[in-house]
Amino acid sequence: MSVAKKEYKRVTVKSLVDMKKRGEKISMLTAYDYTMAKIVDGAGIDVILVGDSASNVMAGHETTLPITLDQMIYHASSVIRAIHRALVVVDLPFGSYQSDPKEALRSAIRIMKESGGHAVKMEGGKEVKESIKRILNAGIPVMGHLGLTPQSIYKFGTYTVRAKEEQEAIQLKEDALMLEKAGCFGLVLEKIPAKLAQEVAESVSIPVIGIGAGNGVDGQVLVTHDMVGMTHEFNPRFLRRYMNLYEEMTNAFTQYGEDVKSGDFPNDNEQY
Ligand code: KIV
């Protein structure tokens, strides 16, 4: 039996670099499950991030720390089954890469083998340099993540804007250059001043994707559940809500409940 020829052109790490070169902005959103990934991919979003924010969004944890490698693999494999075009980047969760480069490589290999993801993302700068190099040597594309790195929330103590002080800004710029030199194909900058993010984006040839990092970078990422308004308690300034699904879903569930109780549902056309 022949497989139908697919009409779309897949996004690759190389196409992202080419997009930066020609000044085309890159769109990125999170997904943790098949149904959401199918919609995000179908809408033509370039990159799907299977973020460890699944720990908050899907499991209700206060931080991203509790999610495990097995759980990330489960989420990522569900996403991979849905996509036709987007590049799928999978977060290495807290505790799966910090202790040594060999462990980092083992974790990255598990993600690639068991989920079918296309690349991994990991938080941190010079402290994870050796791990990044080892993963890259195995042929696995790596995306960096600097600025507010939620896996270090207990070190920061707060989710406020990072790198406002000169010393931290200098370190962040050095880390970005190091990540580029090490061979990362891209970089996420989270919640840092827009001017600093623009400077970083202009200083490296790899795509810089911002979240709360202004418009001077090469692309944007948001948590999908936040931008469609399914979550409603989290209201940072950088978040643009495109829908209010929390309200719409609440209305739908309320109406359904009433229809069931009143006997209105199902009607004659909704049964066999
Ligand atoms: O886990 C995540 O969703 C992320 C984005 C916020 C960049 O890392």
Image: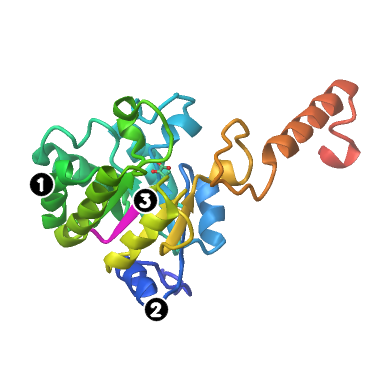
Left or right for 177, reference 34:
left
Taking the image as drawn, is residue 123 in sight?
no
Residue placed under numbered mark 3 in the picture: 189
**144 in magenta:** no
Left or right for 65, reference 222:
left
Observer-nearest of 204 and 272:
204
> Does label 3 point to a residue whose CB lies under 8 Å from ligand 1?
no
Secondary structure character of the magenta stretch overall? strand
Q: Nearer the viewer, mark 1 or mark 3?
A: 3
Residue 107, percent across and down?
20, 40
Q: What's the residue at 42%, 73% (across, down)?
A: 9
* Secondary structure state at the residue bearing disc 1: helix
Observer-nearest of 106 and 143:
143
Vertical comparison of 104 with 119: above or below:
above
Q: Amino acid at mark 1?
A: Glu
Q: In 3D space, how far apart are the residues under numbered discs 2 and 3 (Cα atoms)?
A: 21 Å
Residue 222, percent across and down?
50, 49
Residue 127, percent across and down?
15, 41
Instruction: Report the disc number at residue 22.
Output: 2
Residue placed under numbered mark 1 in the picture: 130
- Earlier in the chain: of badge 1 and badge 3, it is 1
Vertical comparison of 196 with 64: above or below:
below
* Image: magenta residue range: 184-189
The N terminus - image quarter: bottom left
Q: What's the residue at 27%, 69% (across, down)?
A: 205
- Earlier in the chain: of badge 2 and badge 3, it is 2
